[in-house]
Image (tube, helix red, strand yellow):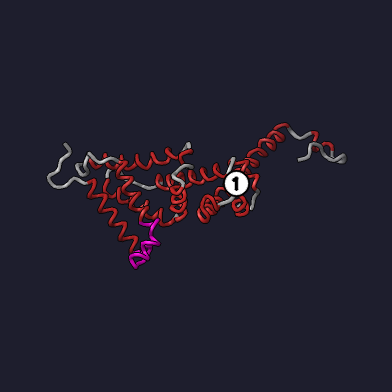
Amino acid sequence: MPTSAPATRPKVAARAPAKTLAKRKSGAAPSREQSAQATRDNILRAATKVFARYGYEGGSVEKISKAAKSFDRMIYYYFGSKEGLFIEVLEDMYRRMNEAEQALSLDAEQPVESLKAVIAFVVNYYSKHPEFITLLNTENLHRGKHIAKSQRAKDYSSPAIAVIAQLLESGVRQGVFRSDVSARNVYLLIAATGYFYLSNSHTLSAFLGENLRAPHALAQWQAFIESTVLRTVTLQPGETNG
């Protein structure tokens, strides 16, 4: 907005009410902030795709800025470095999965069915977000050195384990679940069985001579995970929580 009006219309600018000017000024800042956030989010989305396709070494700043239709300098401005961007990609990946999991409608008073719902969520999420698995594989090749520098990663694992802990506690109160099983181990059991199957599905499909990503194969594996987890946590006949 110009700071002064044309000479033929001096009164318009000179007599603009103070409230109107203040409103215009206050409205300009959010617009710039929104634009900056949109640019940042666009770079993050582009980086997720590029790193998932080319890995950390192959995912150059140039490829990311081109995919984002942005400039290299904007990546350094918002993320500091390529490593800083990669760390935020990993954090964002965990955050999105965490938010999706928190949106689940679980009934703690129905621990068996709710635990099945958690398992179904994990398997389906891995299946529908192959970039999640690819990026984790990439980071594991680097021995987790990037995610180890994250200040937020641990924040995203806590809620997932807390949900399982709540279901296990409910099951113990109802005399359905064992009291000596930790939520951490159940979480790892679900994550490990779901992740390994899908992260290795291409090689395993060739090795076993069947398409492990076919809907019926995925459903069969999900049912197997459910039965494995439930056998692990459920009190067997004659057992008691001493």
Mark 1 = which residue? 38
Apparent side of residue 152 relative to residue 13 in the rendered image (left or right): left
Q: Main secondary structure of the magenta part?
A: helix
Residue reaching furthest right?
8
Is 206 magenta? The answer is yes
Q: Could you say whether the residue bearing mark 1 is in a helix, strand or loop? A: helix
In which quadrant is the N terminus drawn? top right
Residue 175 at x, y percent in the picture: 19, 42
Task: Please identify the residue farthest to the left as the structure is shown.
Answer: 238
| Residue shown at 80% from the left, 38% from the top | 12
Q: Position of residue 235 (x, y in %)?
A: 18, 45
Quadrant of the drawing holding the C terminus: top left
The answer to whether 7 appears left or right of 136 in the picture is right
Residue furthest toward the top? 18
Query: For the residue carrying disc 1, how many other residues have a C-alpha within 10 Å: few (<14), some (14-19), or many (20+)?
Result: few
What is the tally of numbered marks visible in this picture?
A: 1
Q: Position of residue 94 (x, y in %)?
A: 45, 45
* Three-letter code for the amino acid on which mark 1 is drawn: Ala
- Magenta stretch? 197-216
Kindly indicate the quadrant of the structure image that contains residue 4. top right
Query: Going by the image, does 78 lie left or right of 123?
Result: right
- Residue under the image location 60 percent in, 49 percent down: 61
Q: Is residue 196 left or right of residue 31?
A: left
Residue at the image position 51 percent from the left and 43 percent from the top: 87
**Foreground residue, 127 or 71?**
71
**Residue 29 horizontal/vertical position (percent):** 65, 38
| Residue 33, magenta (yes or no) | no
